[in-house]
Image (cartoon, grey):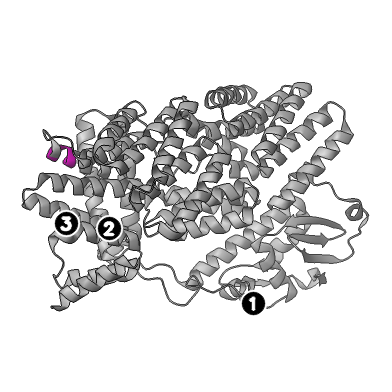
Amino acid sequence: MSDGAQLLGRAREAAAAGDWKRAHDLLTEADASGAVPEAELPWVAQVAYAAGHLDATIVAWERAHAHALQGGDNLMAAGAAVRVAMHLLFDTALLAPVRGWLSRAERLLHGSEATPVHAWLAVVRSYERLLSGDIEAAPRWAREAVEVGSRLDPAAAAVGRVAEARCLILAGKVREGLTALDEAGVAMLSGEIDPLSTGVVYCEVVCALQGLAQYDLAEQWTQAMERWARASAIGSLHGRCRVHRAEILSLRGSCAEAEEEALGAYEELRPYLRRELGWPLTELGRIRQKRGDLGGAEEAFLAAHESGWDPQPGLALVQLARGEVAEAVTAIRAALEQRSSVPSKEMPPNTELRRAPLLAAAVEIELAAGDLQRALRAADELEQIAARFESKALVASAALARGRVQLDEGRPVDARAAFEQAVQLWNEVGAPYETAQARLGLAKAQRATGNEQLADLELRAARAILARVGGDAPAEAELPSRAEAAETSPGARFRCEGDTWHLAFQGSSTRLRDLKGLRYLACLLAEPGREFHALELVALDREPSEPAGDAWVGGDSGALLDARAKEAYRRRLTEIDEDIDEATAMADLGRVAQAQAEREFLVRELSRAVGLGGRDRRAGSAAERARVSVTRALRQALARIREHHAPLADHLDRAIRTGSHCAYAPEPDATVDWTF
């Protein structure tokens, strides 16, 4: 037996044992020696995907497509083209290349009788239409996938049923759609479909429920998906499960755990997703926002935007929290007026569900800007959407928005009733952070009606909830306990008390929720005049049991994109250019705009990775990454201190030096004796 044949045999054994990484490594070696028959390329693609190599998966299917064309096997060529389109759709969200590959498949299938390939073509086309915002065409393709798949391919029929259910929900036929989702789930649980299709069904069911804000059902399906994934999932499904889990944890108020899940999901999905990396990043931003980490939230939202994702309304709400009202107004109005074409499985473009969170944010932002009429229109539209989709969470969001508007209108009694409804509904949903926001509104309404005692109770309840969640309460919720009120603040204090920092300076004190930058400041204040390298601060802040990983080791992280990835990006650019030409000829301006946005994203990625003369750019050094991270954390901490204790912030602004080396170096006449 030849060496190549031996490698293939060992690869089969590894795949049979579920050791996908070893199977892929052996196949890669066998392929390099020319030992992999062209007929085996579909299997090579499946192993590559299971091992976590989306690029190799797509290359294998592209090769299978070319080989089938050469051999005159149009059906096989069409099937391979559909698989390329499916992976690009579900794992990159680049829709222009998807359309190109689907068009190839359609040409090859023209005039032939129905086959399983036709069923899968309809599946992918239904989702391509759904994620493009074409809510009229998507249901027709989903129905075709169900009809053809029911006769010829149960897996295609199962995925088609989920697509059909989602279309029903987005059309406002919520109960009918939820029933269809249940039926799709039951078919999946029969065990008759392959792992990849099973994972797609799980993920799409959860996405549909999350987008509808049916959180109880979403949580149940997420738990079922996690149990299945531990033993069966392949490809990017583990990471997708983690994003959904992060969403649920955040809703339930477990924000620290949710942040860990979102970061873990980002790392797991990075080998697969390109543009859709904005999904876990956006969720990370929302979680950090709840925790009061505005700098970290902004960082996540901006990274999502750089990935070609829509960061709104999160970014606008961060601006509002920082007092940048004009910037927040500009951002939220643009988001509402210029509808984003960025695809999202949870909230497809051009749908009312996509507008709901934007409208809720708009009410808050417009009221802060003093534009009551815009806020009123946003609240009206949000109420209509909530009524149409019969979601308790959406109704709660609309009630909170209505209460805010009524309070601004000078109708505190009506506002009180709306806030009470919001508190009750968010409590029933099991969303403590949102409940706290509703209680803050209720406290204002109680105060406006002259009931100071009830206002006090609501403020204290909101503060307690926010403390558990990990976020900061606004100034009006910072009511000290009796012990705190009686406490004096001699000298200067910078003390960590669990998840809270007690800061005292010049006779006044404040308490802040924990921030990484506060921990860095404590290190500097403890040793005035000493210069700490940024890497040292990062290491000091790490828990003893926490592995250093590769984030802060010496050297750089290698080329930003390897040769195969750059070549794949260039192929995608060619496909996007073809889609732009076709869309231009059809005068489809929406499709042109979407394709151009995808082109700009890929060009930006290539430009980031390739320098002058085509030389690879290297990922940043550990020292530089530490400098940027520590400086950002310190600035964020100083900004937070300024919100609560301006004299202390002034002192620290003058005394703290940042950069590669950081230090606390006050002037001799400004020396402070800190206690910790």
Q: Which mark is residue 46?
A: 2
Q: Nearer the viewer, mark 1 or mark 3?
A: 3
Q: Residues within 10 Å of mark 3 (few under 14, many from 20)?
A: some
Q: Which residue is mark 3?
A: 63
Coordinates of residue 163 in the picture (x, y in percent): 37, 35
Coordinates of residue 378 in the picture (x, y in percent): 57, 25
Q: Residue at x 78, y 65 (%)?
A: 494
Q: Residue at x 50, y 73 (%)?
A: 549
Q: Name the kind of residue labelled 1 in the image.
A: Glu
Q: Is residue 234 magenta?
A: no
Q: Main secondary structure of the magenta part?
A: helix
- 344 or 657: nearer the eye? 344
Q: Nearer the viewer, mark 2 or mark 3?
A: 2
Q: In which quarter of the view is residue 140 placed?
A: top left
In the picture, the quarter occupied by the N terminus is bottom left
Q: Is residue 106 magenta?
A: yes
Q: Which residue is mark 1?
A: 531
Coordinates of residue 449 in the picture (x, y in percent): 84, 26
Q: Residues within 10 Å of mark 1 (few under 14, many from 20)?
A: some
Mark 2 and mark 3 lie on one chain; the one further toward the N terminus is 2
Identify the secondary structure beneath mark 2: helix
Q: Residues within 10 Å of mark 2 (few under 14, many from 20)?
A: many
- 645 or 152: nearer the eye? 152
